[in-house]
């Protein structure tokens, strides 16, 4: 039996049961949360006797935090606080996905619940109308840890023909990408595009523009849907920022950012002011841009493969080798947004977006 067949089930057999009618007064709500790694997601489902229209209509729940790295066994119950509600693309109908915050026994946020402080920061700057768009890169892997579509025990041809590629010898896993795209649109995620990336088996989807806290909410649910879609195909999604050592591109979560002032006439001044502020806090941003305080990004931000060095701050127009890129059309129009190319693919978008508004809008120099 091939490795790809181990632990798999027949999806056609499952469909017979999924086609069964559900009583009109019953809704399946899947609670989704970030676990103790700050990178991976967990979920479980409960039945409700009504169709929730907003997250606050859903009851709080709890889970065994000792099994997710979020509590000790002697005091293991962790609360699930409903945060954002989406349609469920896997069950369809009136069923929902519910993104939740995690709270300790004393009602304080767990160490990986970064949503609360992000929401507070976004509330402080709401009159600035901060918009974000994140370009989420990821790598499809077989369950043996080898990139999906790569020759077993070997390597594909060098990078070059794979970026935005077309053809069976250049693109691996498009079925997963298309299924994920459609599932996100159905769910109500603000997904705005997708493309094949530079390394074979690597892809990107983009979410945004989202204002304030919505950026983190929509990206986390988009990630959940991606993992869940790939599960159905028997493929693993890796958010490792450098899944393959050597002469291969890493994976990032380039973050596009603007305020209302940046988007208006003369906005380039506000963009340059923000970049200047960010240049003075480069190390703080690096520590905030991956779950291990910059250790993951050390493998990616080498100054090669379309990255800037992790040790140096730089900016430039249309320069994909800089820390901050100003798109060429933004420089030409004199308004728009900046692109922070430093966040790693496995970053927490709550921490990234909070750090950006803290530096550019809240903290003094």
Image (tube, grey):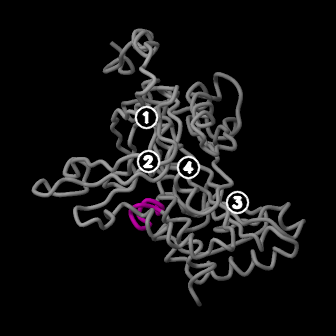
The magenta region covers 290-298
Residue identified by numbered label 1: 50
Residue matched to label 3: 320
Q: Label 3, secondary structure: give it.
A: loop
Residue 72 or residue 160, whichever sits in front: 72
Q: Which residue is mark 4?
A: 218
Q: CA distance from mark 1 to mark 4?
A: 24 Å
Nearest-to-viewer mark from 4 and 3: 4
Which label sits in the foreground, 1 or 4? 1
Q: What residue would you read off at disc 2?
A: 57
Q: Nearer the viewer, residue 287 or 192?
A: 192
19 to 161, vertically: above or below:
above
Q: Dot 3 surroundings within 10 Å: few (below 14), some, or many (20 or more)?
A: some
Task: Please give the name of the residue rendered at 63% of the width and 78% of the height, measured from the top-left corner.
Answer: 360
**Which tag, 4 or 2, sits closer to the chain's start?**
2
The one nearer the camera, 236 or 32, is 32
- Residue 103 spot, x, y in % from top left: 31, 60
For the point 83% across and 64% down, which residue is it? 330
Secondary element type, mark 4: helix
Please state if 360 lies on the left or on the right of 316 as rendered. left
Q: Which of the two discs, 1 and 3, labels the residue nearer the N terminus?
A: 1
What x and y, as percent, mark residue 347? 48, 58
Tell me which label, 3 or 2, sits earlier in the chain.
2
Up-down relation of residue 37 to residue 116 (above or below): above
Q: Are marks 4 and 2 in contact (CB under 8 Å)?
A: no
Separation of marks 1 and 3 at Cα, in angstroms: 49 Å
Q: Which one is earlier in the sequence, the residue at label 1 or at label 2?
A: 1
Question: Which label sits in the foreground, 3 or 2?
Answer: 2
Quadrant into which the N terminus falls: top left
Between the C-alphas of marks 1 and 2, the distance is 10 Å
């Amino acid at each position: 039996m091939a490795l790809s067949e181990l632990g798999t089930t027949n999806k056609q057999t499952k469909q017979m049961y999924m086609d069964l009618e559900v009583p009109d007064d019953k809704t399946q709500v899947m609670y989704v949360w970030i676990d103790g790694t700050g990178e991976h997601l967990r979920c479980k489902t409960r039945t409700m006797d009504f169709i929730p229209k907003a997250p606050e209509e859903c009851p709080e729940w709890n889970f065994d935090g000792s099994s997710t790295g979020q509590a000790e066994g002697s005091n293991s119950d962790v609360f699930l606080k409903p945060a954002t509600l989406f349609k469920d693309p896997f069950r369809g109908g009136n069923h929902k996905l519910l993104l939740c915050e995690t709270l300790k026994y004393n009602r304080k946020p767990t160490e990986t619940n970064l949503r609360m402080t992000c929401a507070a920061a976004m509330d402080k700057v709401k009159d600035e109308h901060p918009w974000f768009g994140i370009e989420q890169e990821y790598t499809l892997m077989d369950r043996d840890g080898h990139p999906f579509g790569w020759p077993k025990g070997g390597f594909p041809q060098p990078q070059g023909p794979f970026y935005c590629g077309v053809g069976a010898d250049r693109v691996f896993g498009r079925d997963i990408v298309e299924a994920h795209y459609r599932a996100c649109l159905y769910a109500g995620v603000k997904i705005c595009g997708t493309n094949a990336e530079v390394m074979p088996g690597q892809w990107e989807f983009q979410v945004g523009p989202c204002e304030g806290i919505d950026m983190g909410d929509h990206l986390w649910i988009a990630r959940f849907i991606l993992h869940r879609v790939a599960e159905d195909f028997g493929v693993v999604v890796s958010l490792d920022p450098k899944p393959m050592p050597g002469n291969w591109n890493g994976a990032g979560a380039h973050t596009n950012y603007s305020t209302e002032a940046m988007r208006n006439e003369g906005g380039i001044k506000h963009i340059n002011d923000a970049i200047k502020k960010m240049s003075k806090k480069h190390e703080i941003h690096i520590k905030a841009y991956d779950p291990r305080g910059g250790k993951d990004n050390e493998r990616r931000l080498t100054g090669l493969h379309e990255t800037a060095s992790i040790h140096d701050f730089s900016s430039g127009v249309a320069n994909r080798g800089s820390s901050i890129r100003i798109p060429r059309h933004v420089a030409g129009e004199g308004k728009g947004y900046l692109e922070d190319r430093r966040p790693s693919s496995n970053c927490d978008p709550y921490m990234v977006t909070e750090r950006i508004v803290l530096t550019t809008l809240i903290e003094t120099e």
